[in-house]
Amino acid sequence: MNDQAADKHFLSDVQTLRARAREHLEDGALTPAYGGDVNKTIEILQTVLATELVCVLRYTLHSIIASGISSQGPKAEFAEHAKEEHAHALAVAERITQLGGTPNFSPEGLATRSASQYVEGENLIDMIKENLIAERIAVEHYRELIRYFGDDDPTTRVMLEGILAVEEEHADDMHDLLVAHEGTPMLEDA
């Protein structure tokens, strides 16, 4: 065993951990070791939930109304993204519940609680662009939140890191569709 490993020790003995676990059972998974502000976390996660729900609605609409000779591929991509955004919304809602909150699924005020916007788009290119814009907003927003949560709430941070990875894939997919339909790359080669 190296010196560094020998210097590490548990901060709490097992008896103390067991005793603490029996206290405040009404708090569920939330223990005194939680380093964040639970109310602020729930408030932030409500905006993340709204953002994901707006994305579900926008992608679902686009998967239905996109038309044109080359719309079948984008329609399938929009439908897939709607499913993935829905899974994100459910994960966020579950985390809100774990923290003792109630997820806000109310359609009233949904657009104002969301970081992204609900823009229908007039044609297939507009739809792709609006989805790319929304994904870029989500990517930046989630990066900021990941930094905010840091080590204070690793569970929320890790959840957001997973969502961020998918949002980056979505942005890349939308960029690829835009290039395919407009014929010129928007990103310079690195």
Image (cartoon, helix red, strand yellow):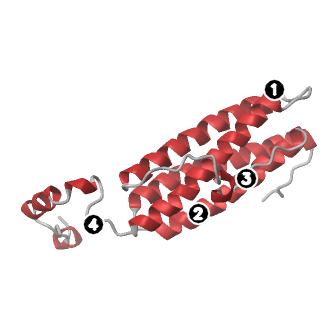
- Whole-angstrom CA distance, mark 4 to mark 1, is 50 Å
The residue indicated by pointer 1 is: 72
Binning the other alpha carbons within 10 Å of mark 3 as few (below 14), some (14 to 19) or many (20 upward) gives many
Q: Which mark is residue 143?
A: 2
Q: Which mark is residue 33?
A: 4
In the rendered image, residue 123, in percent from the top left (x then y), is placed at 90, 39
Between 94 and 106, the residue placed more toward the observer is: 106
Residue 115 appears in the figure: no
- Whole-angstrom CA distance, mark 3 to mark 2, is 14 Å
The residue indicated by pointer 3 is: 134
Check contact, mark 3 vs mark 1: CB within 8 A: no
Relative to 38, residue 177 above or below = above
Task: Give the residue type at disc 3.
Answer: Ala
Say what secondary structure mark 4 lies in: loop
Between 55 and 178, the residue placed more toward the observer is: 55
Residue lying at the far front in this picture: please name it. Answer: 108
Nearest to viewer (mark 3 / mark 1): 3
- Whole-angstrom CA distance, mark 3 to mark 4, is 35 Å
User: In terms of sequence position, does the residue under pointer 3 or pointer 1 come before the other?
Assistant: 1
Residue at horizontal 86 percent and vertical 44 percent from the top? 121
Residue at horizontal 92 percent and vertical 43 percent from the top? 182
Say what secondary structure mark 3 lies in: helix
Say what secondary structure mark 1 lies in: helix
User: In terms of sequence position, does the residue under pointer 3 or pointer 2 come before the other?
Assistant: 3
Q: Is residue 58 left or right of residue 36?
A: right
Q: Is residue 186 left or right of residue 161?
A: right
Q: Is residue 112 left or right of residue 154?
A: right
Q: Is residue 96 left or right of residue 44?
A: left
User: In terms of sequence position, does the residue under pointer 4 or pointer 2 come before the other?
Assistant: 4
Binning the other alpha carbons within 10 Å of mark 1 as few (below 14), some (14 to 19) or many (20 upward) gives few
User: In terms of sequence position, does the residue under pointer 4 or pointer 1 come before the other?
Assistant: 4
